[in-house]
Amino acid sequence: MASSILTLYKNAYGGLSRSTWLLALVMLINRAGTMVLPFMTVYLTQNLHYSIEQAGMVMACFGAGAIIGAYFGGQLTDKFGFSRLQFWSLFLNGFMFFVLGQMQSIWAIGACFFVLSVIGEAFRPANAAAVVYYSEPEKRTRSYSLNRLAVNLGWAIGPAVGGLLASIDYNLLFWVDGFTCIAAALLLKSFLPPVKTEKIDNVKSEKPEKNVNQSAYKDKHYLFFIFLVALNAICFFQMFSILPVYYKEVVLLDEWQIGLVMGLNGLVIAFVEMVLVFKLEGKNHPLYYISKGVLFTGLSFVVFNLFGPSPQLVVLSILLITFGEMLSMPFMNSYWINRSADNNRGQYAALYTIAYSIAQVIAPTFGSRVVQTYGFNVLWYAVGGICILTFSGFYWLNQKTISTSKITV
């Protein structure tokens, strides 16, 4: 039994390039310092005594900056390559965390959070292109999952440590988050020397899906996919913006307990996702798994209305949303990669990142206003309803893709 489990893990992690592992290590170091974002709403409401609606607006500023950062990040990646953009995004983002920690007024915090997001989110399209460059076509879903594993393992560490630091002094979160960004940038520069732009054009790629337009912005199926990704992300991001406040005010958890609960998400992903992807990859179209994952995300919020708030239910909810995330997000990456080509990969990656950035604007604003006006229970039902609609959209897109494939064969 133990031998078969070890073999399964060995097969799931085997065959990935050294550069892919090094890129994942850099991501692990960076994300292990992720402390400000998961505690920002709690920091604003509990430490600075702003309202939950004001905290939601600050989180929306982060999302607005993310849209701009993702768009220009994609353009700059296609034009100049991913290496320099990754380094400068991480390096400058570290210093922005130091500045953010000194802000006290709600307007200054919002403006600083916006700039920090523009710089930080420009990293994502560049990083996506880097993963594609360093991996073989048939191993790209696993390469992305390894990158996500590093991110989520860091997420398991960051909020857990952040919760402890927040119980001492919230200012420590900004210093640690900033220093880990700078450390990740320096390690990236040391481990992975810059790749010249012209070399990227020679990267091996899978044959993209049929009917792919040269511009990602004219690919109608992909644009509908991006719309659905944004809807799913609006629901998923309640985990970072509203759930911590719900844990604090309704379930009555302390900061260190909130940190452990949030960290559980990353810990489960670190141990399970690579094996799950290894077992599922290639057996069904990515959209099949994505649609199922969306349903688990919706259920993770609705359970609070079905059974009432309790620490035990908090753990169940986190496990449900984690399983939904593991089913959907790795295969979302597979979908956009298969529709992109070497000359427009930055555009496709940027649109995918922008979907999440738009959600970062809408999710906290929508969530905080619903809670302020109607309460948490109404929000959880609303999130469940949106997830059902999103599931229907992904299901239709999957059926459309299957029927189109049959016609063109």
Image (tube, rainbow, N blue to C red):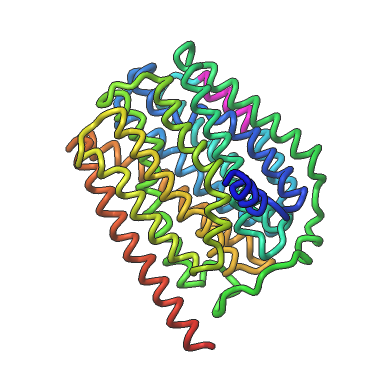
**Residue at x-position 31% and y-position 28%:** 311
Q: Is residue 379 visible?
A: yes
Q: Which residue lies furthest to the top in this view?
A: 168
Q: Quadrant of residue 318?
A: top left
In the rendered image, residue 363, in percent from the top left (x then y), is placed at 36, 44
**Residue at x-position 24% and y-position 31%:** 309
**Residue at x-position 62% and y-position 33%:** 93
Query: As drawn, is 381 to the left or to the right of 186?
Result: left
In the rendered image, residue 333, in percent from the top left (x then y), is placed at 55, 58
Query: As drawn, is 6 to the left or to the right of 285?
Result: right
Q: In which quarter of the image is residue 360?
A: top left
Task: Please say if 176 is above or below 347.
Answer: above
Secondary structure of the magenta portion, mostly?
A: helix
Q: Is residue 76 visible?
A: no
Q: Which residue lies furthest to the front in this view?
A: 1
In the rendered image, residue 272, in percent from the top left (x then y), is placed at 52, 45
Tally of numbered tags: 0
Q: Residue furthest left?
A: 374
Q: Choose between 382 and 112: the one closer to the eye.
A: 382
In the rendered image, residue 225, in percent from the top left (x then y), is placed at 44, 64
Which stretch appears magenta?
93-102
- Is 262 inside the magenta-drawn segment? no
Q: Choose between 409 and 57: the one closer to the eye.
A: 409
Query: As drawn, is 121 to the left or to the right of 263?
Result: right
Q: Quadrant of the C terminus?
A: bottom right
Query: As drawn, is 346 to the left or to the right of 298?
Result: right
Q: Choose between 335 and 371: the one closer to the eye.
A: 335
Task: Please say if 193 is above or below 403.
Answer: above
